[in-house]
Image (cartoon, rainbow, N blue to C red):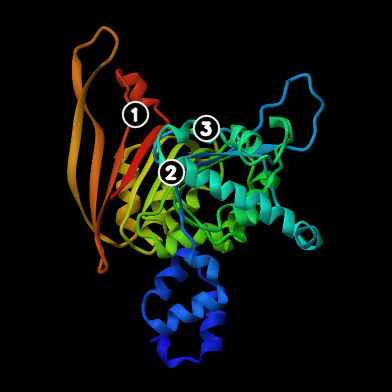
Amino acid sequence: MLDSFPDELIATSVDYLTFEEAETLAWTNKRMMGIVRRDLPQALEPKIDIKKLEFLEIPMMLEAPRRKTRFDLFIQFHYGWSSGPIPFCIRKGKKKRQMADIDAQNYAAFIQYARYCAADWMNAQVEWKEYAVKTSRLATTHADVPRLPLHLLFSRAIVHHFDLTFCDSAWFWTVINGLEETRGSFKDKRLVCSDREVLDSEDLGEIKMSPFMQRGSMDISFQNWVLSKISYGLEDVPFATSEKLTVNTGHSSLIRIIKNFMKAPVHKREWALEELNNNNRGREPWSFKEVEDEIRKSGVRYECAEAVYGFVSRAFEDSLGIEISKTFRIFSPELTWNLQLSRPNTRTLNGIEKCIKFNLYIF
């Protein structure tokens, strides 16, 4: 298809591709190889295969004064060893141009380190700071190892698992906006927020617009997200486009979530929403009947595919069977899918009657 376009237009299009995508394009034919080699030669350089990439906040002493959040990243190569903390920075505008030569030199040393680790499992035990001091001579001590520019750091990387633990909105967007400028390929993404609210509705809207956050959902079918300790916005989860999604712990209205699942576009999903609290103007118990009533009101065609009963006991009385899990099969023109609702482990009838927690699985 691209063969019919002039070279200039193809070269412009290449600017919007990751290096992995540009390399794939280059190997389609001789003409594409020439364009990529001329306009984006970095796409043809050897790749760095990263098993896991983690961004973690640097712990602060409790007695230390409040100051700007600092964070490092950690890389795990396929031999299983970690790079140790890698200091990094995010260059913008004038500073990015001023530091271009120094950043390129430091990045070249990191590329050598990544290839050194990939060559042998013994090499992979060497941490980046040790390598930077002893081999690359970038610094005389570990504390002086220069920060690597984020926009270069993952330009040739294929990151299989991306973990981001964040503590506030500014911290989150600093990292994400920095990654916007890299051409690396990120497969599974995992987000974990702290135990306090750190994103608001405006942030959630920005996530939907962020090229980095949405790139994988559109192009990689096995995109995987894990969200933890979310206490707001979960009713919008049904509209997410990821194929795999896990939400563990949080608060939201079960009925609002069910209602939105009935409205949301249907696509292949393997989702697990676990240990959530039913929070509808206060924490409230819930029932399978009210959930089925909501499904029925939506007008979709459905059936009860499975009901599971467990034996629970009331104090000083015999055990009895009570519904603890129910699976609804939803028939839609695009896809037949299942909604399974269950109560977390509860041993007594009183506990079930007062249970506000729920597990919801979509598959």
> Residue 255, labelled with which disc?
none
Q: What residue does disc 3 label?
A: 126
**Label 3 Cα crowd, 10 Å radius (few <14 / some 14-19 / many 20+):** some
Q: Position of residue 148 (x, y in %)?
A: 66, 47
Q: Position of residue 279 (x, y in %)?
A: 50, 38
**Can residue 352 be seen here?**
yes
Q: Position of residue 31 (x, y in %)?
A: 43, 85
Q: What residue does disc 2 label?
A: 118
Q: What residue does disc 1 label?
A: 344
Quadrant where the image shows the N terminus: bottom left
Residue pictured at 21% horizontal, 26% vertical: 310
Give how far apart the Cα atoms at labels 1 and 2 are. 44 Å
Q: Nearer the viewer, mark 3 or mark 1?
A: 3
Give how far apart the Cα atoms at labels 3 and 1 are. 44 Å
Name the amino acid type tagged 2: Ala
Residue pictured at 73% horizontal, 33% vertical: 140
Decide which of 275, 74 is in the foreground and name it: 74
Q: Are marks 1 and 2 in contact (CB under 8 Å)?
A: no
Disc 1 on helix, strand or loop? loop
Decide which of 62, 286 is in the foreground and name it: 62
Give how far apart the Cα atoms at labels 3 and 2 are. 11 Å
The quadrant holding residue 218 is bottom left
